[in-house]
Amino acid sequence: MRKITPAVLVLLYSINLMAGIAAAQAADPLPSWNDGASKKAIVAFVDKVTKEGTPDFVPVAERIATFDNDGTLWAEQPLYFQFFFAMDRVQALAPQHPEWRDKEPYASLLKGDVKGALAGGVKAMIEIVMVTHAGMTTEEFEQIVKDWIVTARHPVTKRPYTEMVYQPMLELLAYLRANGFKTFIVSGGGVEFMRPWTEKVYGIPPEQVIGSSIKTKFELRDGTPVIVRLPEPDFTDDKEGKPVGINNHIGRRPIAAFGNSDGDLQMLQWTAAGPGPRFCLYVHHTDAEREWAYDRPSAIGQLDKGLDEAKAKGWTVVSMKDDWKKVYPNETQR
Amino acid sequence: MRKITPAVLVLLYSINLMAGIAAAQAADPLPSWNDGASKKAIVAFVDKVTKEGTPDFVPVAERIATFDNDGTLWAEQPLYFQFFFAMDRVQALAPQHPEWRDKEPYASLLKGDVKGALAGGVKAMIEIVMVTHAGMTTEEFEQIVKDWIVTARHPVTKRPYTEMVYQPMLELLAYLRANGFKTFIVSGGGVEFMRPWTEKVYGIPPEQVIGSSIKTKFELRDGTPVIVRLPEPDFTDDKEGKPVGINNHIGRRPIAAFGNSDGDLQMLQWTAAGPGPRFCLYVHHTDAEREWAYDRPSAIGQLDKGLDEAKAKGWTVVSMKDDWKKVYPNETQR
């Protein structure tokens, strides 16, 4: 290979950058979004905060954007995908636990009876999560998630879960980053369930993923340091927990926030209440044909109070059916 | 103002970048470090992990470096600076608390008798921290810290605390960042005590500061969202807590870690135990003339087990007296 000097690198970079700028000016950064009020509002906000010398200009360091994950960046029906992970883990661990055959909630789960397993309520849910998410080191858990995410298939679509991400939101993430935003996930899901794949799938590195967590413990095992996952809840990154998690991890208030349920309402409220220009957006699941349609009475991803507040406050409400040309990346356009 | 087009910006940026590269090649990036084993070890490590096409090359995304704060980036004698903050707050709040005149640990503190105040042990310490760090919103606390950090003076040097940062470590932070590292603080100090000034002083943004924390709570006050600081410990980012905090906030293992006390040992162990090239460094306080000299028996910043392990494992141990040309930024070179 010929030696590339720094000066050559800079020139290559400049050419690349100028080409990129030209392309960006020519091409639509949000091609999967229909031209409508939602897309206009997004572009208007980004234009506003990036225009230097205006009162609405926001320095790059303060361009923090936070995204919910389940139902905002990827689908969440008929159950949160992390719960399918937990059920798959129960199946995988069953041979080591013969006692599960006669013990709830495992007995029902192993027979494929999810409803029966969940009859035990929150207690049963927590037991399933703890038995599948704790007891191993953080590195062992990371490998379990990495193996699962490439092999598991969604029960309805039969696709990998990472193909059930929303193409318009991937474009939105890239568009914001191209305009100097730092994009974060702020999800009720487990932080260590998301981090093994968010960089590849969303371009969001592990240190920009905030989520729920269980307690962990550092220890030396025969002189080798490990971090062990304990069967004890630590932080719930949902509802009032979202602004707390944002404050704890980021330490500054986002100027833009994106969600799809009442669990995101406090994050949007916290974002909206800061000084200067703010942008809040709800993804509204209105597309029963290409995805799912649900809002006010839904057990998963309920959007009730949030929908009222969005209307009252003039937040952007995206109708998946009307605003999105396509939902998933591997989908022919309508 | 003339309009600056993106192309002009790119050209300006390129010129700037080329000038910067030329300057970096010509100038020593660590001018306050004496040429010795410590400096050589730092430069050799950075050269190694940034050389593309070699087995030791580390991609930019994985170049995570973590720094302790007290005693590693700024001084910590005769007491942790955050404790001086707490004492100043007790003085400031005293008029609203006439009962403190007859109540320990306040009565002693208000008379300037620190030893008397600390006679109450950990319980007294926690009480002082909670009364000065909790009960307000996060934004109110941020303002209190910002006001204090510009006005407060160190009892011995009479300088602002932010002038008692270590010049060689500022250069090291900049050198690592210039080589694609993401630099994090991982401190036993309060995370919200550090964030208001770390970006300005160290170039480390709030989202890259990890520290100890108290519980917080999101609430609506007359419709306005606030986060309130509660008088309840949440997370202690010290000793075994440091790898836990790193895992929780960053989600990947650092490849380089910098500390000065036994409180940093587990962070260094966790860093050293990862695969591929690793760098661990202890700052050893050996300079009684320009700073302070202390290690094994010190109550503040004790370095005992860590010193043994550093020697056994071949970690870099910096002697402030021998390795540093200057300690503080505003100091003439020896």
Image (cartoon, coloured by chain):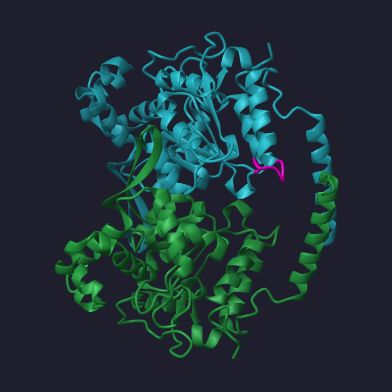
Chain colours: A cyan, B green
Q: Residue at x 45, y 22 (%)?
A: A309
Say which of A32 and A99 sits in front.
Answer: A32
Q: Main secondary structure of the magenta part?
A: loop
The image shows residue A43 at horizontal and vertical percentages of: 68, 29
**Residue located farthest toward the top when viewing the structure as drawn:** A289
Q: In this orientation, which residue lies closer to the viewer: B237 or B165?
A: B165
Q: Is residue A86 left or right of residue B6?
A: left
**Residue A251 visible to the viewer:** yes
Task: Judge whether residue A230 is colored magenta.
Answer: no
Reply above or below: B298 against A251. below
For the image shown, how many numbered marks are present on the structure?
Answer: 0
Residue A238 location in percent, x, y?
Answer: 38, 33
Q: Is residue A214 left or right of residue B251?
A: left
Q: Quadrant of the N terminus of chain A?
A: bottom right
- Name the foreground residue: A155 vs B76: B76
> On the image, which quarter does residue B304 sit in?
bottom left
Quarter of the image for the C terminus of chain A: give it. Answer: top right
Among all residues in the image, which is located at the extreme left? Answer: B102
Query: Which residue is at a point 41% across and 48% down the rendered structure image?
Result: A248
Residue A153: % across, % down: 49, 23
The answer to whether residue A171 of the structure is visible from this angle is no
In the rendered structure, the answer to whether residue B233 lies left or right of residue B333 reads left
Q: What span is colored magenta in the figure?
A: A51-57
